[in-house]
Amino acid sequence: MASVAYGPESIVLVLAAAGSAGLGMTLPVTIAIVVLLTVLIASYRQVIAAFPNGGGAYAVARSHLGHRTSLVAAASLIVDYILNVAVSIAAGVAALTSAIPALLPYTVWICLAVLVGITALNLAGIRESARAFMAPTVVFVAGILVVIAAGLLRSEPASVTSAASTLGASRTIGILLLLKAFSSGCSALTGVEAIANAVPSFERPRVRGAQRAEVALGVLLGVMLLGLATLIGKFSIHPVDGTTVLSQLTAAALGHGIAYYVVQFATVVLLALAANTSYGGLPTLTKILADDNCLPHRFAVATPRQVYRYGVLALGISAAVLLIAANGDMNALVPLFAIGVFVGFTIAQVGMVRHWRGDHVRGWRWRLALNGFGAVLTCVAAIVTTAMKFTSGAWLIVLVLPLLVLIMERIRKEYNRIDGRRGTGCLPAPPRATGTVIVVPVSEVSELSREALSAALSLGHDIVALHVCLPGENTTAFTKAWEAWHPDVHLEIIDAGDCTVGAPVARYVRDNFPDRRKVVLIAEVDPSTGWDRVLPSHRSDELERQLRRLPDTVVCHLRVQTS
Amino acid sequence: MASVAYGPESIVLVLAAAGSAGLGMTLPVTIAIVVLLTVLIASYRQVIAAFPNGGGAYAVARSHLGHRTSLVAAASLIVDYILNVAVSIAAGVAALTSAIPALLPYTVWICLAVLVGITALNLAGIRESARAFMAPTVVFVAGILVVIAAGLLRSEPASVTSAASTLGASRTIGILLLLKAFSSGCSALTGVEAIANAVPSFERPRVRGAQRAEVALGVLLGVMLLGLATLIGKFSIHPVDGTTVLSQLTAAALGHGIAYYVVQFATVVLLALAANTSYGGLPTLTKILADDNCLPHRFAVATPRQVYRYGVLALGISAAVLLIAANGDMNALVPLFAIGVFVGFTIAQVGMVRHWRGDHVRGWRWRLALNGFGAVLTCVAAIVTTAMKFTSGAWLIVLVLPLLVLIMERIRKEYNRIDGRRGTGCLPAPPRATGTVIVVPVSEVSELSREALSAALSLGHDIVALHVCLPGENTTAFTKAWEAWHPDVHLEIIDAGDCTVGAPVARYVRDNFPDRRKVVLIAEVDPSTGWDRVLPSHRSDELERQLRRLPDTVVCHLRVQTS
């Protein structure tokens, strides 16, 4: 729904290049978009019915189109969730700076502040209830409808934004320009999929409810887009730097009074909430992908408040990068949008065609035709959108989508290897004890060495204390102290060669006990809380790194606290 | 020496604010700076003699002024090493873009590319020999001297840079403006300390050699600064956007021919080498600080090629942040510079005053007076510089210096606590074996669990296999598989409560075996090389995190490779 705030704007921006004649084409282009919207709504009603558990394109592709296609769908969803955050925040801040132009120089900082705020709320597990959504949505929809009604009744604009307009010279309107405007405007359709992804969150009867919501969304969206396009033509709105088209329309229809500010602020709040929806969607999607072994399992780890911290953080960081790169300008981000949506739409509908061919319910031919028609339309739209916006940023999406798919496939492969090595499923042989040698690296005679050797003695009898002689070190002091201590443990002194400790210890352990189980016990003092990331013991980390890949070797850490 | 490239420029930039009359004051301001230079050179000859092992201000302060003052000196050195890299690279790129204006829009990218290149070379341990330094230095010095000579002989400039000049309206020249110009020009003196820091790298007789180098540097620097200032007055050079003052002077004296390009490119190379000197200095300083427990010990870890990787990386990243923040503009960075240098100068000379009072060598009164005078001068210069440049960036230094000192003090304190806990020095009691229980968390019946239990059986007899029942999990499948396997190990099943595994295991281990040594054996499959950072086992990391702070607990990792 929030896409009404940037969809019409992006059409106007493209058409303005062809002067007033071009702007006259706003309504026809919008009509084409609304036709596409109708087809999409009709075919998504069927997706909802067939996949009542949600998941949208990813779920459809996973059941009907095989593994790789489902990853393409997942990648396009990921990209669009991230873009939704960036575009919604940029559009919300644009609405804010339109109302309060003094804030314009701080656009990027406001964008980042909003992003950090939303991310922090989501990390803390604070989620808006459906009610929180209702009020601003109602205000926004009512506001837009009032703007449309008032604008249609009014013969002269109530207020004209007087500023340097960026209207291009009058030119002939080519088919390319119209296609470009159409593809830009398609960003207004990005909300259609959200409902199909989130069926489980509807109240029972879920399918009915979700279908109704989808139709209601479609009707409202269509009415608003058509109404706004009519007003744009009527008031001959031009793109003006620093003021959004919606803000100009509101001012033209309602004047620059209190009503204007109410609509603007409802837009800001609604767009912030629209950005927030991604924080519900993306972490859930990455959780599913992690469960399917396509992303690191960390994405599936929930905090006690059911927050998937990695997903939320990944979303926040990616959106921040986009906002900084685009300098907080929503019109630089909108061209990236919609491609992923159409890729997802196409995959979902092709999957539905397969679905109907396998499942001959009543009227399946008719349903198949509808989804097939939808697939053709959205596929064409995807191609047109990509081609038209390739130079203005879409190349990034063309690059990122396959890269994401590739990464997810590689991760899946690696996890499969790990699972294979775990050897689940078959009954293993019984465990058996084997001969064990315990190696304890000691760097000095100290309380810490005593604790390390005590622990080693508690674990076995065959113990070697290993001292690495660093370059420039004189061992006599150490051996003297050792003899004075006389801990009754065999001592080996080896030479470091270069400056490090890890490699010589690993070499010694590997070469001297070929057929036995090796246990290396590393003792270290743990810094107090908060310092452990700043002052980790590099000796012990280095030993760990060198020893972890040795076969038949168990690395033990005895950590002593400072307090 | 390279500071000649940006010192005069920053004087001109300040004085231009007062119009042509202001620019006429370039020579007097430069004379004041050269006087300061003379005093500094004379007192640093004494520093070199007293501290033949190098270390400059930090070494002086550590022997004579106590621990905290030496940290202030160290922090000011760190700040200046970083700023030297940023300023030198920015100035070098400014020289490049002056010669080839087409490159001007890519300033930041060129700066970052040069920085990455220098950092990479240093990370790889490739160091320029002193010879590599010689050629461009000779070309640069000779070039500047030729420029000065030719400029003095010539009555009319050979070529005038015609561009929008940023000359301010003619105003009266206040004392504030002169002080500001003086403090900006002081950035030309930053090279004086470098020699005192690097005495050990001179050939024998070191002290003589370093002292001679210091005097030679002072004389050359003084001659060049005075000569350039005279030329600036003679050709009435104004600051011009996109062209450095040095480039204008060269063009004015030598024309825009091949000689101009030779001088410009010698400047570029010399500045890159000047940036590179920090890569020798800072990692060595951070190594000394790490050995003194004031920085994480990682800064003291050398690669086999004797590269202190953390120091080099910290330097590169800090300089990159500065260059990006300043947008590659050297005149934005120069105001930050010189403050740290003067703080270091002052500390060094106050320390020398103490030194002479304790060590009554021949002529100590006279030496003390010289260093005392130098200390007063540099202290005044430090205060003036900070006050004059406070709003144009110096506040950052005023903030960062105490912060660095604070951090280093906290780190030292924490390391002292750790060393105290190690208990070196006294003879510890002999190590003794104690009763041990081995806990093996098992999540499933698999090959991996067999290997874990085999390792546990090799280490002791009292073994508990611990299965954590996650929410929503049905334990019957697990217990059935366990009974079928029948590994002859005691099995405990505990409830997770929330979603994680770590906390319940830690609770079980802590509560059930109060007086015994606990060993927890974690088995995991290690991903193949390269993947271990992307796909770490979050279960095992979580166990590690929860268990590492338990008393009397040894955490063992049995890692199985996928290949």
Image (spheres, coloured by chain):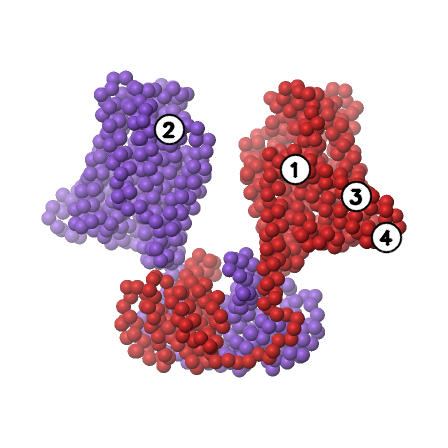
Chain colours: A red, B purple
Cα separation, mark 3 vs mark 2, equals: 62 Å
Three-letter amino acid code of the residue under disc 1: Thr
x and y, in percent, of residue A435 in the image: 48, 80
In the rendered view, tell whether residue A296 sits above or below residue A25. below
Position of A213 with respect to B130 (left or right) is right
Q: Say what secondary structure mark 3 lies in.
A: helix
Label 4: chain? A
Q: The residue tagged with tag 2: helix, strand or loop?
A: helix
Reading the chain from its start, which is encountered first: label 3 or label 1?
3
Circles 1 and 2 on the same chain: no
Residue A382 appears in view: yes
Residue B258 placement: quadrant? top left
Tell me, yes or no, whether dots 4 and 1 are on the same chain.
Answer: yes
Q: Residue at x 72, y 23 (%)?
A: A24
The residue that label 1 is drawn on is A386
- Kindly identify which numbered label has been placed on residue A372: 3
Give x and y (percent) for residue B476.
Answer: 70, 74
Residue ID for mark 4: A360
- Identified at 38% across, 24% down, the residue is B240
A69 sits to left or right of A535: right
Number of numbered labels in the structure image:
4
> Which quadrant: the C terminus of chain B?
bottom right
Dot 2 and dot 4 residues touching (CB under 8 Å): no
Characterize the local packing of mark 4: few (<14), some (14-19) or many (20 or more) Cα atoms within 10 angstroms: few
Kind of residue at disc 3: Gly
- C-alpha distance separating marks 4 and 1: 35 Å
Q: CA distance from mark 2 to mark 4?
A: 75 Å
Identify the secondary structure beneath mark 1.
Answer: helix
Which three-letter amino acid code belongs to the residue tagged 4? His
Residue assigned mark 2: B99
Measuring from the top left, give residue B116's x and y in whole percent.
42, 44
Q: Earlier in the sequence, mark 4 or mark 1?
A: 4
